[in-house]
Image (spheres, rainbow, N blue to C red):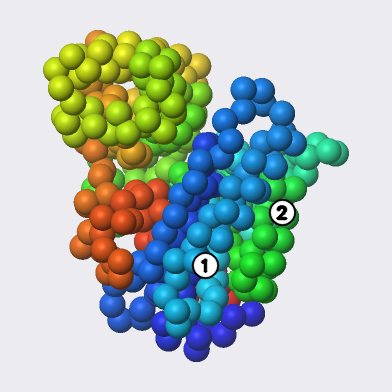
Amino acid sequence: MWPFSRLQRELTVAVFDIGSSSVGGILFQHHPNKLPEVLTSARFSTDFLSDLDFQKIQRSLHKTFERTIAALKRRMPKDWKRPDATIIIFSSPYYISQNKVIRFSKPKPFEITEKILEEIVVDEIESFKKKWETEHQPVEILEQEEMKINLNGYQIKKPIGKHALSAEISLHMSLGIKVIQDRLRECIAHSFGAMPLLFRSFPFVAFNTLKDIVDISRDLLVIDISGEITDLMKIKDGILEEVISFPFGENILVRRIASAFNFSLAESSVLLSQYIRDALHAGTKEKVRKIIEDASGKWCQFFKDAVKNSAEFSYLPSDLLFIGGKGALAIKDFATCAKEQPFTSRFLLPEAFKSRFIFRKGFSEDKDISLMISSLYADKLFLEKQPWQNL
């Protein structure tokens, strides 16, 4: 158990973002009475693998994770020793999530107790784990949260002790791969020593951070375009209702540019950045524009197919919020996806977080929106003094 008294002082926190094609890490200081202070950050790409061999993916992930830890340690201020806590956040494809609505009723009014809610949640989690767990690939719960509880058809924020004839619980759950989590635990222990450690999924983290930043009273579709995968996070009636993914991300744009110009992937990534900044001469700009336009059409087709094949996405919010890096900015013309329904697109850029942090080394060195979102989530956990006390 981590005593609450320790939460009244400054704490150093390590946050890692495990993405589809990279590993990012950030170290920040939690201050009880002021903004979190970013100390340093780093991000490295995992090896591009043409075949989806699980063992090779693991080795590449672990190698890149260790490289990210080493970079953070090198860049730390001289007076730094080690983090007080670590949180590791998985993006697709390293988690499985499920949102379940549980309904039950009785002929006579019954009291909602902690025991009733706990039994319901435990049963659902066990069922969820059995669905995905195999003998050769055990899973671990990343998070579980009752997003909303309705009693007799009305949302109740504090249901314990209330009486009702019917109840409806909206439950969010996600699972991670145990062998990957165990290996990352070993890496942290070897580099930093024993400490409190949490695992989470990025959609859950993003939702809990964004609800303090943007208005989610209106329904919202959050679109996270990462290296290899796009996640669609549907927020409806103020809760994270569902998450689906499809295999099309920023790296597809980079690879297409590399093929067209006979450039390396690194050179092509720079070219994409220059295109977004409108820093290319006319001929090159037009060539890149055509590549992105074609790729955007393919992205839109993936989007439509993913939505069409998901019953939970039969209704789409018209308000879109793009997060992510160059991929989100490149695929900014959503018109080809909006023939049947008009959409309003917004972009959440790193600059939006400038006023929410103190940057020891300067803001320009830490423009990583996934790590910023994740750091705000971690800082919020300390301010709320949970769930660290259970570790």
Which amino acid type is shown beneath numbered disc 1?
Answer: Lys
Could you tell whether 303 is left or right of 3 in the image? left
User: What residue is shown at x 36% (from left), y 81% (from top)?
Assistant: 32
Q: Which residue lies at the image location 83% right of the left edge and 38% below the top edge?
A: 136
In what quadrant of the picture does the C terminus appear?
Answer: bottom right
Q: Is 244 or 347 nearer to us in this picture? A: 347
Q: Quadrant of residue 76?
A: bottom left
> Residue tagged by mark 2?
183
Residue 138 at x, y percent in the picture: 77, 44
Name the side, left or right, on which 24 lies relative to 189.
Answer: left
Which residue is farthest bottom? 5
User: In this image, 379 relative to 362: left or right?
Assistant: right
Which secondary structure lies at badge 2? helix
Residue at image location 44% in from the left, 28% down from the top: 265
278, above or below 125, in the image: above
Task: Specify the label residue 73 is tagged with.
Answer: 1
| Disc 1 element | helix
Label 2 neighbourhood size at 10 Å, few (<14), some (14-19), many (20+)? few
Quadrant position of the N terminus in the picture: bottom right
Nearer to the camera, 136 or 163: 136
Visible residue check, residue 300: no
Q: Quadrant of residue 28?
A: bottom left
